[in-house]
Image (tube, helix red, strand yellow):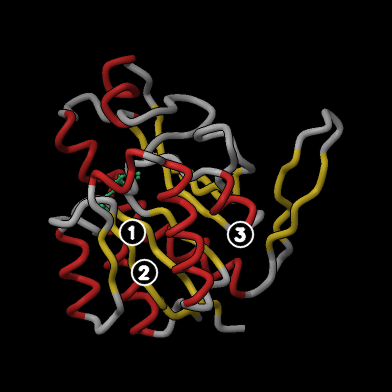
Amino acid sequence: MTIKLGVLISGSGTNLQAIIDAIAVGTLDASVELVISSKPDAFGLKRAEQAGIPTMALSREVYEDPIAADEIIAGELRRAGCDYVVMAGYMRMVHEPVLLAFEDRVVNIHPALLPSFKGAHGIADAFHAGVKVTGVTVHFANAAYDEGPIIAQRAVDILPDDTLDTLEERIHEVEHVLYPQTLQLLAEGRVRLVINESGRKITAISPS
Ligand code: GRF
C-alpha cells in the first residue's frame, strides 16, 4: 500500500531528504503530500519545493497558542489526505489536535536509544555521559515526549577517538537509512500495537 505522509520539520531537513530519495528510488512505498515547518527559514522547505511538494510555514506568533497551532496543522494534514504524520527534526511538541486526528499515526525519530537520553540534546548527552553505545530510535509520538511505543532502533558505537562531530555524523547516517526503512514497515502494514505484560502499549512487527 502506498502511504501518504505529512512531514513536520524545523531545520535542515536531511531526514526529509532521505525520505524523498527513498521514495524516488522505490524503496519506500509512500508519497509526501505536505511539509509543514515551524520555522519559515528552514532549509528543509527548499528541499520540499525542489521535490515539488506543497509546503507551509508557521510563524512564531502562531505557536503562542500551541493548541491553536496544532489545530491548524491537523486541519492541513487532514486536508492533504495524509495517513501518517512524520516528525523529522520538528522542534515543537505535538498536542491533542494532531495526536487525536492521527491516533497512533504520528511518528518521530530520536537520535539516541530511548528511553535513554530523551530531550533535545540526545547525541551530546550520550557523548558526554561516556556511554559506549548509543543509536537511533523511531517511535510513535504520544503526549509524553519521547515515550511513545518504539518501532525500530539501531545501535551506534561511540568510538575511542570520536568527537561530538564525528558521532553526530554517524548518527545522522543511520537515521537516513532507518527512517525510510521504518516507514516502509508501516507501508507494508507490518506494525501492530499490542499491550505487553506490564500493561504498556508496544509495537509488534510482523516478519516480511
Ligand atoms: C535529527 O537528528 C533528528 O533525530 C532530530 O533532529 C535532527 C533533524 O535533522 N529529532 P534534519 O532536520 O532531518 O536534518
Indicate the amino acid at tag 2. Answer: Ile
Q: Distance between the residues labelled 3 and 2?
A: 20 Å
Q: Answer with left or right where residue 187 lies relative to residue 207.
A: left
Indicate the amino acid at tag 3. Answer: Phe
Q: Distance between the residues labelled 2 and 1?
A: 8 Å
| Front one among 67 and 46 | 67
Residue visible at 28% across and 56% down in the picture: 58
**Element assignment for label 2:** helix
Q: Name the residue under label 2.
A: 19
**Element assignment for label 3:** loop
Residue visible at 83% across and 32% down in the picture: 199
Along the polypeptide, which appears first: circle 1 or circle 3? 3
The reply to whether the C-beta atoms of the residues labelled 2 and 1 are less than 8 Å apart is no
The reply to whether the C-beta atoms of the residues labelled 1 and 3 are less than 8 Å apart is no
Where in the figure is residue 162, as x and y percent of width and height?
19, 30
Farthest top residue?
A: 129
**Element assignment for label 1:** helix
Residue visible at 48% across and 25% down in the picture: 116
Q: Distance between the residues labelled 1 and 3?
A: 24 Å
Q: Name the residue under label 1.
A: 176
Where in the figure is residue 17, as x and y percent of width and height?
27, 67
| Front one among 127 and 65 | 65
Callout 2: few (<14), some (14-19), or many (20+) C-alpha neighbours within 10 Å?
many
Q: Answer with left or right where residue 121 lies relative to residue 189.
A: left
Indicate the amino acid at tag 1. Answer: His
Residue 102, which numbered label?
3
Callout 3: few (<14), some (14-19), or many (20+) C-alpha neighbours within 10 Å?
some
